[in-house]
Amino acid sequence: MAEGEKKRPINRLKTMYPLRALVDGMYERAVEAGQEGKPVAWCMVNWWGGDAILRAMEVAAVYPEDYGAVCAAFGAAPAYLAQADSDGFPSHMCGYARNCLGYAARMKELGAIPPEAPMGGMPKPTLLLSSGYFCDTRYKWFQALGRYLDAPVWVLEMPHPGVKESRLEGVREHNIKFLVAELREFIAFLEWLLDRKMDWDKLAEIIDDTIEMNRVWYEVNELRKARPCPMHSRDFWSSMPASLYMAADPKVTTGLYRQMYEEVKSMVANHRGAIGEEKYRLAFAELPPWHSLKFFDQLAERGWNFVIESWAYHPPKPIDLSQVSDPLERVANLTYQYFSGYFEDAYNTGDWWGYFAHPYLELVQEYQCDGIVLHPLLTCRTATNHLMVVQDQLMSKLKVPSLVIEGDIVDLNLFDPAEALRKAETFEETMSHYRQVRKEAGMAW
Amino acid sequence: MVMSEMETGLDRARAIYQDRTRRARELKAEGKQVIGYFDIYPVLEMLTALDLVPYRILGDMNEPITKADACLPTVVCPFIRSVMDLGLKGRYDFLDGVVMAHGCEVAEKTAHIWRTYLNPAYAHFIDTPHTTHTAALEQHKELLKDFKKTLEAFAGKELTLEKLRQAIEVHNEQRLLVRELYDLRKPDPPLISGTETLQVLVALASLPVTEGNELLRQVIRQAHERRDGPRIQPARLLLWGSIIDNTAIIDLIESLGANVVMDDTSLGSRAYFPLVEQTGDPLDGLANRYLVALKSPRTFRETVLTKTKRKDYLADLENRFSYLKDYAQEWKVNGVILEVLRYCDIHGYEVPGLKDYLDHIDLPSIYLEHDYSQAALAQLRTRVQAFLEVIG
């Protein structure tokens, strides 16, 4: 460290920066594509099937969910939120959505990308690709964009297989068949919309690269079980969009995740952690306050290392799909594995308390967490519905306490960092207490 | 004397509305099995065909939420929180089982939370798709086959095609009778008030379908015969929005010089108007009715495009909301109240677009948001008053 340079509370991974740049570059690439008259899609996270199809059809994609986080981080969100509010969208609705609706309203008003838009903005879309998994907002938001945009909306349907009924005979088969049929209908729609044909060989290659990208990314996160944990949640959040949103060629992304794997592996070998002294290991649920990420630096200074996050932002547990010959069926199985792979234990134990909540039991044990920070989002039902159940079950089954800090992913006004820090200070005693309780109960951590 | 023999017509509907579990408990004492359900997506015909009594799980605006905080956060639908709270307090302990469907995201999560905390003897979740795609309709039929399997296992008997066809017939009969009930509000003055209509609807959701049909016949006959029905009012309103299962909001509106003559809510016309087509395989008709024919904001309707493959906003609104224009014409509506429960995303996203549409057809509207409590309704009084003055 150079003389006089202050040591940062979190040791950020060097390999995170190129991944983040890859994601950030997505906006510039899409704007260029739009300028060249190439098709552009605004997409919801769709768990890789839709992404691969768009890439194979040479449609540039941007992700307004990610752009919501970008606008929050750059301070551009308040004006867009205000615009959506004044247009009559209730203020309790998704911060990402209201940010995007406000952005689209402004773009319609100007007839161009708003000059203040961070990262160069999102270009006018040719189509909107929505998805129907675990969030009503994902398709209602894009439908509501019709006030400002003349782009057609396609909703990619998906089942919710993490529940008891998923274990009935034949359910997996008809769910996969459904996913594949949906992807085929989407391809047919795209071919009609764009007047071009799918390149099936290219699609197969992209799908295989996507499977490999997710496998490597999964292995990176497995390394975080080490003590001290070498990779903080902030690095996870910076790196996850490359997989979750398929921000670039998955072959390129895979290469960057491999570099990250090597860096993290080396840190584990050298017993180097993400923070100076790891006093407490924590999980985080669900999405963070993007506008106030420095809050985690303050916690790092107190010895809080965030070692794992919700499964929902992680890649699926790897499965062997090499015997599945149809590429659409391969990617459907990958998606289905994401939807169901984290609940195998729940299936086996008959613990039907909600597919969104159960994986925390497994993660908190595997990553040996002293506590969990629950971040109920005042504008997001998806990320909040299950948190009280998580709190209840982690305490009753694992004696792991929860710290509840209310806030929002986009709206800065709904988060109070000073109050949150006060709560955190008190929570340290609680974590220490339950560490002792677990020890007396013979638990592993 | 059991409840069924005590009153008839509107008196009976009111009695059931005020004590809606009583008849279900009587049936239970007679040896019937009662199955609770959420929202309008569980396929009730399949319950009726197996001689199971469908019983709609509703909330209670008058009951403070004290137990649900432990398992549902405050920033989700207050109606669902109320439902969960009542469940935890034992209000629904007479149910033999529950069937839930993906009516909305919060209801879907609550289905699993209900199962965890209340451990019903029978529970089934139908993952109703979100679009009317061909693949979605096929998937929905598969889901109904799955439902049939678990239901037969629970009931210990086979759900035969003949029984299912008969159940479809008797449920369709109810739907046609509900249309007749709604026709009573077409004249001016209407022959039945909005409050009375809601009491009948809540009663229907609490009775076996055949008893509900008998109640409807009584009410319709009584409404035609009586002379003390509602009076003419300057405003004839359509109420659109989330669920309304308490008469307080309609009482409030009707007390201010309006007749609520039509609705589009999930306990009202939305739940009853579409019929099930009798198809060779009854599951085809049921799958179509519950996914395609039911008109609710939770189901995505395909975008209407121009010849140049761009979205035509007004045509798209027309495709989604033209049935409201039909309602307005048939029921001679001169104003619309858009009523949305706080934190109800699927209705919240509709509001600006629906207002655009209503403006386009020159129908005045007002947006009211509330948190499913009596106290909150009092604050709406001034806004409703002002709206009535504008359209009056």
Image (tube, rainbow, N blue to C red):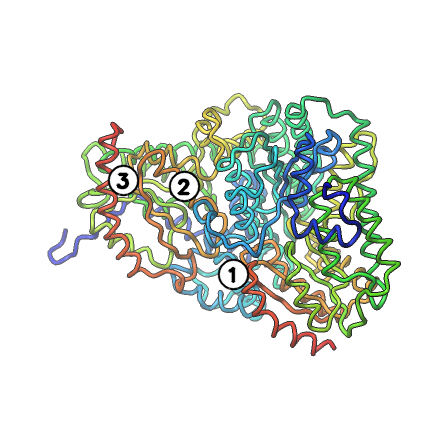
Could you tell me the amino acid type at mark 3?
A: Asp
Query: In the rendering, which numbered label is found on residue A81?
Result: none
Q: Is residue A133 visible?
A: no
**Res B377 quadrant in image:** bottom right
Q: In screen coordinates, is A261 left or right of A153?
A: left
**Residue A131, image x and y in percent?**
57, 45
Q: In which quarter of the image is the C terminus of chain B?
A: bottom right
Q: Which of the marked residues, 3 or 2, is nearer the chain's N terminus?
A: 3
Label 3: which secondary element = loop
Question: Badge 3 sits on which subunit?
Answer: A
Question: Badge 2 sits on which subunit?
Answer: A
What residue sits right under mark 2 in the picture?
A390
Q: Which of the marked residues, 1 or 2, is nearer the chain's N terminus?
A: 1
**Residue B347, image x and y in percent?**
62, 56
B280, A4: nearer the viewer: B280
**Res A76 quadrant in image:** bottom left
Task: Judge whether B270 appears above or below B168 on screen.
Answer: below
